[in-house]
């Protein structure tokens, strides 16, 4: 159950304005190719990441951490689905777009290519991960070609095959495009030696694009891919993000490693920490998982729980296929929190598909077993299939799936339940691979639905007013625990304080919410404590709240949500573009004229028994 309280009149419940400080190379054409097919390819050492997370390398290095903005989920023309949508922007193009270069939507469609899009100079990304589907990389890279006809891989052993010619034709459609993998590779990328070699070449091309775009202290690229697993239509996909240049020789796909446990075991064997390889596997679209996203694979024994703790440290809460924060089903006893009704993709999603419910399930497992496999930090992303990382503006959104939604009319008629997607903010010492990945790993990260709202959350046992000009140095110096962490030991018999700070983007903030769930007598209690913001607080705010219902020994988590004042949804702007041609629903008060409250979510802080 869920209850909303007004701000408690406690000494710790203070709202004060405060200013916040803010090499791999490709094989040359004709070069001999390794066509071996190892069962578990070992990690192959490459150029190590630059510096450690705490080694000062950049002029803006800050021991108290800066905020950096990035997208951890982007697809390019190397993804078969994106190619079928006529996307021709490559990984190189995605990284260039993230830094301000103009790129065209659906450039592969001679008759209906979309507009040329460019990020505003103030909206460039600080870090980025291109995450093309591993399952179809041999097809996407080995069959694909640029708009001028240049093959992505001139050395592809099957580029001239009938299957590849169909792939490059204008007849290619989704989802039929996925079947092109079978005549080329069989049911597995490792089904033929040629496919194994092409998978390796495609992965090297992805890495080369990331390495060439990496500019330490300015723009960080992270190696990654999407492990694309579905079960009876349920989305169980995960983005696999690596922390350095030391990565497996090939990506481990869902065609060979069919559940998360198998993926984690493959990473255990092929991504060795002793060699400098680290990885995170980030579930996305849990809202479309049919309640399965927070199930453990296999027998859920201690090895699987330990693997989940190592690899599954983050979850994607918002992207273009909807929001996954929490279920709103009052009749079923789930979340009386009305703000759960935000960018819901479907009303038929089981409540167990949502992040808040998944985190709660983790508490229940912790209460029963002493281990929590779902201590998940919060990230946001786009899942953009145009090769356009970070394109999240409601006012100028141009779609995300090529020819499917590259006009206002298509978006309103074909994808009205979708949205521009989200973005991730990390609190890191500097903008390098080592520092960004370390922040992701320790979960000192937050997500937004697009705006660049800066939020921080700390836990402390002190009643000190930390909302002063020396914040956050003062609370860090006093041992405050940041978002993503575990509450420090109670020095006495007091109750914990939580300090939240937020800085608006362009639009004023309407409220700060603290969400708490704990387990008492085997049952979850859910609370949402809301702090309305007015005046100067709507721009920059800092507040401290002491939990009056804290029960020592009860497993719990707390996270903060910063909510903007209402603004028009993207559909309203599309209606304006269409003018007299606008469809039904664009009239005043129509379904396309919805106002929304965009928001940011911090990673939780956990109380362990």
Image (cartoon, rainbow, N blue to C red):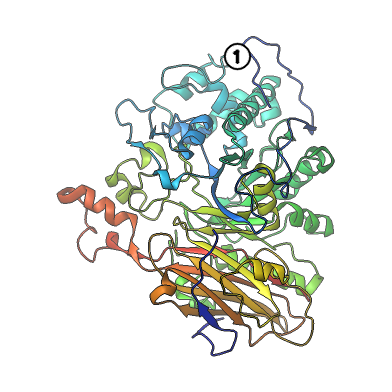
- Describe residue 328's horizontal placement relative to residue 187 as left or right: left
**Seen in the image, is 329 located left or right of residue 11?**
left
SS under mark 1 = loop
Q: Is 595 rendered above or below residue 367?
A: above
Q: Residue at x 57, y 57 (%)?
A: 286
Q: Quadrant of the C terminus?
A: bottom right
Q: Quadrant of the N terminus?
A: bottom right
The foreground one among 482 and 361 is 482
- Please tell me which residue is depicted at 51% across the width and 71% down the height of the picture: 18
- Write down the quadrant of residue 451 in the picture: bottom left
Residue 121 is situated, as x and y percent measured from the top left of the image, at: 41, 43
Disc 1: which residue:
155
Q: Position of residue 71 (x, y in %)?
A: 53, 47
Seen as rendered, the residue at the extreme bottom is 9
Figure label count: 1
User: For the residue carrying disc 1, how many other residues have a C-alpha within 10 Å: few (<14), some (14-19), or many (20+)?
Assistant: some
Is 87 situated above or below 26?
below
């Amino acid at each position: 159950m869920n209850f909303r309280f007004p701000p408690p009149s406690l000494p710790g419940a203070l709202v004060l304005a405060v200013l916040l400080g803010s090499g791999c190379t490709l094989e040359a054409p004709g070069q001999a190719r390794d066509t071996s097919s190892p069962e578990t390819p070992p990690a192959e050492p490459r150029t190590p990441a630059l510096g450690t997370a705490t080694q000062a390398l950049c002029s803006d290095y800050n021991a108290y951490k800066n905020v950096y903005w990035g997208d951890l989920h982007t697809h390019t023309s190397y993804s078969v689905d994106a190619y079928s949508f006529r996307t021709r922007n490559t990984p190189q193009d995605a990284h260039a777009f993230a830094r301000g270069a103009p790129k065209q939507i659906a450039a592969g469609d001679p008759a209906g290519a979309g507009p040329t899009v460019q990020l505003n100079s103030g909206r460039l990304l600080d870090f980025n991960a291109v995450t093309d589907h591993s399952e179809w990389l041999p097809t996407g890279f080995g069959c694909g070609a640029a708009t001028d006809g240049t093959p992505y891989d001139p050395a592809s052993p099957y580029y001239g095959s009938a299957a590849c010619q169909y792939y490059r034709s204008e007849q290619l459609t989704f989802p039929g495009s996925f079947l092109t993998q079978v005549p080329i590779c069989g049911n597995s990328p490792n089904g033929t030696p040629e496919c194994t070699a092409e998978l390796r070449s495609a992965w090297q091309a992805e890495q080369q694009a990331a390495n060439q775009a990496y500019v330490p202290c300015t723009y960080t690229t992270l190696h990654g891919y999407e492990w694309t697993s579905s079960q009876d239509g349920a989305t169980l996909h995960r983005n696999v993000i690596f922390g350095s240049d030391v990565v497996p020789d090939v990506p481990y796909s869902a065609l060979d490693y069919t559940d998360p446990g198998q993926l984690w075991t493959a990473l255990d064997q092929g991504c060795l920490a002793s060699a400098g390889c680290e990885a995170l596997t980030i579930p996305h679209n849990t809202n479309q998982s049919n309640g399965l996203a927070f199930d453990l694979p296999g027998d859920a024994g201690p090895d699987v729980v330990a693997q989940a703790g190592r690899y599954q440290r983050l979850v994607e809460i918002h992207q273009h296929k909807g929001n996954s924060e929490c279920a709103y089903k009052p009749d079923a006893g789930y979340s009386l929190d009305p703000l759960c009704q935000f960018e819901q993709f479907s009303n038929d999603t089981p409540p167990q598909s949502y992040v808040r419910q998944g985190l709660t399930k983790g508490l229940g497992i912790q209460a029963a077993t002493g281990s929590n496999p779902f201590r998940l930090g919060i990230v946001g992303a786009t899942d953009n299939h145009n090769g356009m990382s970070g394109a999240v503006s409601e006012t100028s959104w141009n779609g995300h799936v090529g020819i499917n939604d590259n006009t206002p009319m298509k978006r309103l008629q074909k994808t009205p339940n979708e949205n521009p997607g989200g973005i991730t903010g990390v609190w890191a010492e500097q903008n390098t691979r080592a520092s960004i990945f370390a922040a992701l790993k320790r979960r000192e990260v937050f997500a937004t639905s697009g705006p660049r709202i800066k939020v921080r959350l700390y836990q402390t046992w002190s009643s000190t007013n930390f909302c002063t000009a020396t914040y956050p140095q003062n609370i860090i110096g006093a041992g405050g625990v940041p978002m993503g962490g575990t509450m420090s030991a109670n020095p006495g018999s007091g109750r914990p304080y939580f300090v939240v700070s937020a800085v608006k983007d362009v639009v004023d903030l309407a409220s700060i919410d603290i969400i708490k769930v704990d387990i008492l007598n085997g049952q979850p209690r859910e609370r949402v404590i809301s702090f309305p913001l007015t005046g100067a607080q709507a721009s920059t705010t800092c507040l401290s709240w002491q939990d009056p219902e804290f029960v020592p020994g009860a497993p719990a988590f707390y996270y903060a949500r910063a909510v903007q004042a209402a603004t028009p949804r993207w559909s309203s702007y599309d209606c304006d573009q269409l003018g007299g041609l606008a469809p039904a629903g664009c009239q005043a008060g129509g379904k396309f004229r919805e106002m929304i409250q965009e928001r940011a979510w911090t990673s939780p802080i956990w109380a362990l028994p």
